Image (cartoon, helix red, strand yellow):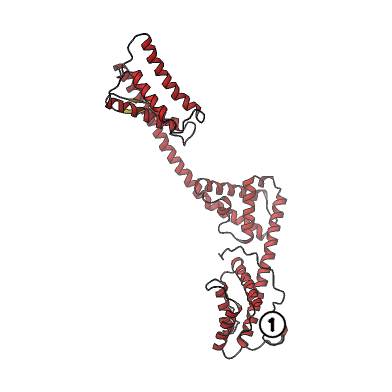
């Protein structure tokens, strides 16, 4: 794998580098052994001078055997590499023993003129081979750069196509065709290429769903999962259309519920705020809990439907607006969570700033959240308080 000249120059042959990637690209053990082998020769040349060729080689092979364990080369773990070192030791031991039995001198350690010429020719041959490899590497780098550019340029349009397909399927469910299936498959392939070659910190689903929400996000994610598992090809067009109808219907119902409960929340807030503006200090822990639940419905509405809607309706009186705004600030986390005592203290402070109470509703039926008796009793949500929303914590886009 290498050669050391009598002037101390050490050359490592190309084969030592090629050996690194022949079986395991992360295994430089053979290269390390080649370098160490020639180091032993160079050290022997400086410290003691070379002995015979056979003895000099045996010293180097013995040195390889001593460090084999450090490099992870063992008789059981890497038997082929271990046997190669043992064979090198045995080869030169046998040569030394044979020469002594036959009473003939060992080979000189220094190269003859013919050997030097042969080594020079081998070196020149390797230089030519190395030049070819360098040219191949240069060409490969260019091709890889072009491929990376192509993958990057394809990623944006692929994700855009997937988003358009998902939005269209949600708006007009049940109209998928084989052409549409092909576009989904192509988009998946290009997005997966981007993840594999460019950004392995993301998974394909995360890359595909970015900039999507609601029905389109759910449908695009389902398509990507099917494409990744190979199931997309096996589904019929009827099954794909059934999934789009199911997803679109579920999201239509969810959005309708979000709108309804958004209105209920502000109706409830307005009723309690009106009572607290006229008769402050009547808040109960149950009402505080109801406010927190309805606040979650506001978050869902802002996330799914309209993130630009104002925090407090303009139809509220000034006292109601300040009251509800304070409650929502507390729930938004700008201040620590409060108890009914905190709410009542704030109600009294705010109501004192607005001595003229808001006019009472003309009839109990016009304000379902109001106390029919007009007193300071608990105001129950009407209709009944909805389930706590299945809000996933995403902020409005």
Q: Position of residue 173 (x, y in %)?
A: 69, 58
Toward the viewer: 194 or 44?
44
Residues packed near mark 1 inside 10 Å, few (<14), some (14 to 19) or many (20 plus): some
Disc 1 element: loop
The residue nearer to you, when weighing 124 against 200, is 200
Determine the residue positioned at 43% across, 41% down: 142
- Can residue 167 be seen in the rendering of this structure? no
For the N terminus, give its image quadrant.
Answer: top left
Number of dots carrying numbers:
1
Residue located beneath label 1 in the image: 367
Q: Position of residue 75 (x, y in %)?
A: 49, 27
Q: Does residue 261 appear in this view?
A: yes
Residue 299: image location, x then y, percent: 60, 69
The image quadrant that residue 384 belongs to is: bottom right
Quarter of the figure with residue 311: bottom right
Along the viewing direction, whichever of 328 and 126 lies nearer the viewer: 328
Quadrant location, the C terminus: bottom right
**x, y (%) of residue 88?**
42, 22
Horizontally, is 299 left or right of 36 in the view?
right
205 shown above or below 128: below
Q: Is residue 374 above or below residue 300?
A: below
Q: Residue at x 64, y 71 (%)?
A: 293
Residue at (62%, 82%) from the top-left corner?
A: 273
């Amino acid at each position: 794998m290498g050669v050391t000249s009598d002037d101390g120059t050490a050359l490592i042959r190309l084969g030592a580098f090629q050996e690194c990637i022949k079986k395991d690209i992360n295994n430089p053990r053979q290269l390390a052994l080649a370098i160490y082998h020639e180091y032993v020769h160079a050290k022997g040349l400086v410290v003691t001078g070379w002995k015979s060729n056979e003895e000099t080689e045996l010293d180097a092979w013995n040195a390889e055997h001593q460090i084999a364990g450090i490099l992870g080369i063992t008789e059981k773990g890497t038997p082929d590499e271990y046997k190669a070192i043992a064979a090198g030791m045995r080869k030169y031991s046998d040569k030394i023993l044979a020469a002594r039995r036959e009473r003939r001198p060992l080979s000189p350690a220094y190269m003859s003129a013919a050997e030097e010429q042969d080594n020079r020719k081998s070196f020149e041959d390797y230089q030519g081979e190395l030049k070819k490899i360098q040219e191949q590497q240069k060409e490969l780098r260019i091709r890889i750069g072009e491929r990376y550019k192509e993958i990057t340029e394809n990623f944006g349009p692929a994700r855009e196509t997937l988003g358009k397909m998902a939005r269209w399927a949600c708006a007009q469910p049940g109209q998928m065709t084989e052409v549409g299936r092909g576009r989904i498959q192509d988009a998946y392939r290009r997005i997966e290429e981007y993840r594999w070659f460019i950004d392995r910190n993301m998974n394909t689903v995360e890359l595909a769903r970015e900039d999507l929400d609601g029905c389109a996000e759910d449908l695009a994610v389902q398509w990507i999962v099917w494409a990744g598992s190979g199931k997309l090809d096996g589904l019929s067009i009827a099954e794909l259309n059934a999934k789009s109808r199911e997803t679109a219907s579920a999201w239509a119902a969810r959005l309708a519920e979000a709108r309804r409960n958004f209105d209920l929340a502000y109706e409830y807030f307005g009723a309690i705020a009106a009572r607290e503006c006229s008769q402050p200090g009547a808040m109960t822990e149950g009402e505080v809990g109801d406010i927190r639940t309805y606040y979650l419905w506001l978050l869902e509405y802002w996330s799914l439907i309209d993130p630009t809607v104002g925090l407090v309706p303009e139809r509220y009186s000034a006292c109601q607006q300040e009251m509800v705004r304070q409650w929502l600030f507390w729930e938004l986390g700008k201040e620590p969570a409060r108890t009914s005592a905190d709410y009542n203290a704030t109600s009294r402070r705010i109501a004192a700033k607005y001595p003229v109470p808001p006019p009472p509703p003309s009839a109990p039926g016009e304000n379902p959240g109001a106390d029919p008796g007009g007193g300071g009793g608990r105001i129950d949500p009407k209709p009944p308080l909805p389930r706590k929303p299945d809000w996933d914590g995403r902020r409005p886009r």
